[in-house]
Amino acid sequence: MAKKVLVVYAHQSSGSFNAAAKDAAVEVLCAQGCTVDVSDLYALKFKATATAEDIVGEVKNQDHFSYAEETKLAWEEGKLSKDIMEEQRKLTQADLVIFQFPMYWFSVPGIMKGWIDRVLTSGYAFTQEKRYSQGIFKDKKAMLSFTTGSNESMFSANGINGDMNVTLWPLQNGILHYCGFQVLAPQIFWAPSHVKAEARGTMLAGWRTRLQGLLLEAPLSFTPSDSFDGAKGFQLKPEVQEKHEGQEFGLTVGTHQGKRLPPNSQIRAGV
């Protein structure tokens, strides 16, 4: 069955490396029979701020406005703004979501963070009962594809920027996995603005090759939700701790049990 793909794209220039990476994804995936939607956030002039304007009509509590609570009610009542509803429609239909962007300040650009804040509303994208491995989007895949301004060595365990695995944890675990997505390994284009055109061409060729089998890739590993005890503050269950007591590395970058971080667990699947 043909898959549906959503590319959430954030770059101001159609002549950028990010634009070339986005175009490559569209071309290769369409050639495989996929249907690809692109949300070009700058072209859409997508609103980045989460405000009461995202709700059609009166809010329930103007004096003590809670964006999470109000948008949950608005989603249930079909009263979210048109731009949010359109993005949720695309996301609902998608089997795979690719976030294509230049890394800004160790994270996504503000306009993409606005997409995350506004589109992944409570109730629609997650609930207290449906999150992480039991999340609402557990049958969907998602991945980050991005450029850096710094060289790969600077994002190493001994590098000045720190370990890229740590940098990616809030994005891949705290956003994508939190909503249930099966998170594919990121596509990282290291400092394309600092290399020659030939090297940039090699990067794009590698991306095109990966795209050929992207839909069949295994996701990154995260600790299952049932490994944590909800009655005890969602701490690791004693039997899980005991099972991994003798291991050299912690379970994940975040849940590391005071041990060494598992190397490259946020960059490569199967580690």
Image (cartoon, rainbow, N blue to C red):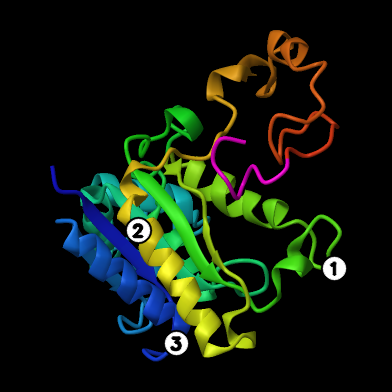
Q: Which residue is mark 3?
A: 16
On the picture, is 121 further left or further right than 269? Answer: left
Residue drawn at (65%, 79%), measured in percent from left and top? 149
Highlighted range, magenta = 263-271
Nearest to the observer: residue 197 or residue 72: 197
Q: Look at the picture and state if 109 lies above or below 238.
A: below
Mark pair 1, 3: CA separation = 27 Å
Most common secondary structure along the magenta stretch: loop
Answer with mark 3 or mark 2, whichever residue precedes in sequence. Answer: 3
- Residue 212 visible in the snapshot: yes
When asked about the image quadrant of residue 248, the answer is top right
Residue drawn at (35%, 83%), measured in percent from left and top? 45
Amino acid type at image mark 1: Ile
Mark 2 neighbour class, 10 Å CA radius: few under 14, some 14 to 19, many 20 or more: some
Mark 1 neighbour class, 10 Å CA radius: few under 14, some 14 to 19, many 20 or more: few
Amino acid type at image mark 2: Leu
Nearest to the observer: residue 218 or residue 88: 218
